[in-house]
Amino acid sequence: MSRVHRLTQLMQALRLGSGPHTAAALAQDLGISARSVHRDIATLRSMGAVIDGAAGYGFTLIEDNALPPMGFRDTELEALVLGLREVQAIGDPDLAEAAAAALKKLEGRLPPSQANRLRHAVLTAHRFERPAALEISPSELRQATWDELEVRFGYSDVKGAITERQVKPLSLIYFDRSNVLVAWCCLRQDYRVFRLDRMRDLTVTQTSFRPQRVALLRDGLARLKEQAQAKPRPPAV
């Protein structure tokens, strides 16, 4: 692990949680010695990070001056907090953890007054019903989508019939009660929307469709929009 990478990892560890973080715990998380932690804390302080604490007590990040401050209007800040807390409420564990980490990073880059507003934002998000439990790994599916690799899975339709699909994954969309994958289906030779809670036995293949994802997604969303608009609507009453 390079020194720069280690300092970055240490700063992120300090951002997470309220502290204090002991040198022993930080050393175990980063896979380094406690002595290295103390040296790196001194380096971060010299770079402008305000870190409270000392050996035997633990360390708490007070102000993250190692990164340039960011400025947001109050409504922009509330919108960011609301969006990230919504992800914490509806996302799978990896996404929820990433949203929490992003909030901590954002807090560290804000001026003190706005960091305080972020910690005590008036907007939040809560879901009494979370999306159904999944039999596949959404993290693997997201990575395959980024990597533009085709995936295979078993899919159960509304009647319970199961078919084997191989698709080009294009985008994941989070709805109120379910999450879906927009994809080009190799079986149907057309765009399809698959509910994640009806997918099972996900396999990421080595068949690449790079660099087609952006163009396919644009055309697929346009096609799905046309299909939705073409559906008959009930008469107004």
Image: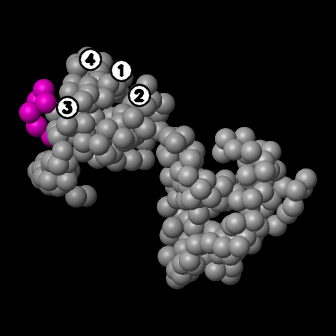
Give the amino acid at mark 4. Answer: Ile
Residue pointed to by mark 3: 207
Q: Earlier in the sequence, mark 1 or mark 4?
A: 4
Q: CA distance from mark 2 to mark 4?
A: 15 Å
Foreground: disc 2 or disc 4: 2
Residue 210 image offset from top left, x and y in percent:
18, 45
Residue pointed to by mark 4: 162
- Residue 136, quarter of the rendered image: top left
Q: Residues within 10 Å of mark 4 (few under 14, many from 20)?
A: some
Residue pointed to by mark 2: 136
Point 74% across, 53% down: residue: 37
- Residue 139, quarter of the rendered image: top left
Check disc 2 and report its element: helix, strand or loop.
loop
Q: CA distance from mark 3 to mark 2?
A: 19 Å
Give the amino acid at mark 2. Answer: Ile
Q: CA distance from mark 1 to mark 4?
A: 12 Å
Q: Residues within 10 Å of mark 1 (few under 14, many from 20)?
A: few
Pick the front one: 8 or 97:
8
Q: Are marks 2 and 4 in contact (CB under 8 Å)?
A: no
Residue pointed to by mark 1: 201
Pick the front one: 63 or 72:
63
| Residue 152 appearing in the image | yes
**Residue 59 on the magenta span:** no
Foreground: disc 3 or disc 2: 3
Magenta stretch?
186-191
